[in-house]
Amino acid sequence: MSQTLNIIKVGGGVVEDAASLARLLEQFAAMPERKVLVHGGGRLATSVAASLGIESRMVGGRRITDEKMLQVVTMVYGGLLNKNIVAGLQAKGLKAIGLTGADGDVIRSHKRPPIALPKRGNGEGALDDGTEQTVDFGFVGDVDKVNAQFLSELIEGGLVPVFAPLTHDGNGHILNTNADTIASSVACALAGHYDVTLTFCFEKAGVLRDADDESSVIPLVNEEQFQRLMAEGVISGGMIPKMENAFDALHRGVRQVIITHSDNIDGSRGTSIK
C-alpha cells in the first residue's frame, strides 16, 4: 500500500497575513503524514513592485511578468515569503526546505508563448466585445516536467518541501508560474510514488454558491456540475483555473482534491472535487 502524502497549496492572501499564516503553520506542522507546501504571494509582489515604482499589469487575473517584475517576484516569492515560511516551520520542529523549480532541477517549464484572449470592452470584468487580443505574458512558465524521484528522496529523507511559485527553463531563466499549477503538477508527478491528497486553501470556506455567504459551501463538485456552475456564473474568475487544475490532477492519478479555508487543511470541511 502506498504511503499517504498531503500536498497543501495556500494562497498569498493567507501567507501574507501574520495571524492566518500562524494558524496555517500550526495545523500544517501537526499533520502526521508526509507533506508538501506550495505557496502564492501575488498581493505582496504587487505591493513591493509599487514601492519600487513598477506597475503591475494583469490580464484575465494573470500577471504580466516583464524583466523588472520578474526580479520582484523572484525576490518576494523565492526570498521573503518562502524563507519566512520555512523559518516558521523550523520553529515547529519540521525540517522544512524552501524550493523553487530551479533548485535541484525539480520543476522545469517553458516560457508561455503569446496567446489570444477575449478583449474586454470596458475594462476588467466587462463583457467580451467579440474580438481577441494577443497577450504576451512575458517571463511566465508553463510546467513541462517535475522530478518526482528527487522530490520523493527529499520526503523520504525526512524533509518537508516548501515551494515558491517559480520554475526554470533549463537555459538559465527563472519563470513566474501559477502556484495552483505547481501544486497540481507536483501532486500528479508524485501520484506514482504516494497516495496523494491535494488541498487548495484560501480565504473562503470552499466553492461557494453565493460569494458573499460563507455558509453556502457546495460540498461536492463533479465535472458536469462544474460546467453548469460556470454557465450559471456561480464559478468564475480565479476559481475556474483552480477547478481545472483540480480535475486535471484527478485524471492523472491524484486520489482526492479538496478546496477549503486555510483554517481547515485537514479537509474536514470544504468542497470535495470528484
Image (tube, rainbow, N blue to C red):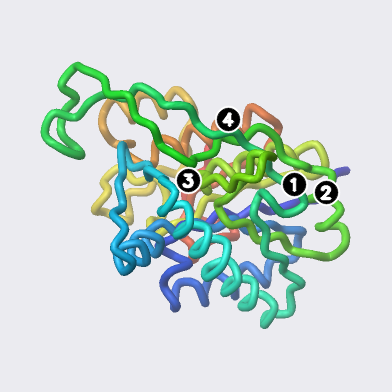
Q: Which residue is mark 1?
A: 105
* Residues at marks 1 and 3, CA–CA distance in whole angstroms: 33 Å
Residue at point 67%, 39% (across, down)? 171
Q: Which residue is mark 3?
A: 271
Dot 1 falls on a residue whose secondary structure is helix
> Quick check: 155 left or right of 237?
right
Residue at point 45%, 44% (across, down)? 219
Asked if the residue at tag 4 contacts the one at tag 2, i.e. Cβ–Cβ closer than 8 Å, the answer is no
Residue 187 visible in rendering: no
Query: Given the image, on which type of amino acid does mark 4 rest?
Result: Asp
Up/down of 126 relative to 260, above or below: above
Residue 150 is marked as 2
* Residues at marks 2 and 4, CA–CA distance in whole angstroms: 23 Å
Query: Given the image, on which type of amino acid does mark 3 rest?
Result: Thr
Image coords of residue 60 (percent x, y): 31, 37
Asked if the residue at tag 3 contacts the one at tag 1, i.e. Cβ–Cβ closer than 8 Å, the answer is no
